[in-house]
Image (spheres, grey):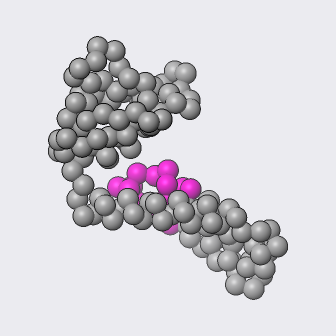
Amino acid sequence: MEIKPDRMISLGYGKYWRSDGIVGLMRIEEDRGPGRRTEVYTSTVDQPLVVSRGERAILQDMAVATDEGVRLQEVQEALSDLLVALGDVPDVLQRSLATEARMDVGAWQRRIRALQKTDPSEPLPDSQNDLFE
């Protein structure tokens, strides 16, 4: 992985650090929770910074963005926006969509959540039949 120098990386809750100043990331296993996701080791501070963002998100921001990486991030953001929008669909409209268009809003929400949790290099699940019943 190539780290892009002089890029300001968000560590969460208003904390930023230069990408080339970060020398290590360690996932917090015990007492992990809001505001406590990752320990960030830097070249200038003796103790690790405890930050709210996950190590993968920080690494993605640190790396040189390829066109494919930028496109993937745009798709992930669009999926997140779609998930929020689907959550706002009233129950009566969900029932109507299920009846009239055979579109299961809940199944789409579950599938998007599953896609957001999986590694992009892993193959997608074969079961897509429950999306339109």
Asked if 89 appears above or below 62 in the picture, the reply is below
**What residue is rendered at 82% in x and 73% in y?**
92
In the rendered image of this protein, does residue 27 appear above or below residue 90?
above
> Picture coordinates of residue 4 (x, y %)?
19, 45
Quadrant that contains the N terminus:
top left
- Of the 4 image quadrants, the one containing the C terminus is bottom right
Q: Is residue 91 left or right of residue 131?
A: right
Q: Quadrant of residue 34?
A: top right
Q: Is residue 125 visible?
A: no
Segment colored magenta: 113-126
Task: Tell me residue 60's x, y (percent).
Answer: 32, 47
Examine the image and state in which quarter residue 31 appears: top right
User: What is the tally of numbered marks visible in this picture?
Assistant: 0
Q: Nearer the viewer, residue 87 or 18?
A: 18
Question: Residue 49: percent from the left, percent from the top?
Answer: 38, 23
Which residue is more in the foreground, 33 or 126? 33
Is residue 41 at all visible to an observer of this figure? yes
Magenta stretch, overall SS: loop
Q: Residue furthest front?
A: 14
Q: Residue furthest right?
A: 92
Residue 99: within the magenta?
no
Q: Does residue 81 appear left or right of residue 119 in this picture?
A: right
Res 128 quadrant in image: bottom right
Q: Residue at x 61, y 61 (%)?
A: 84
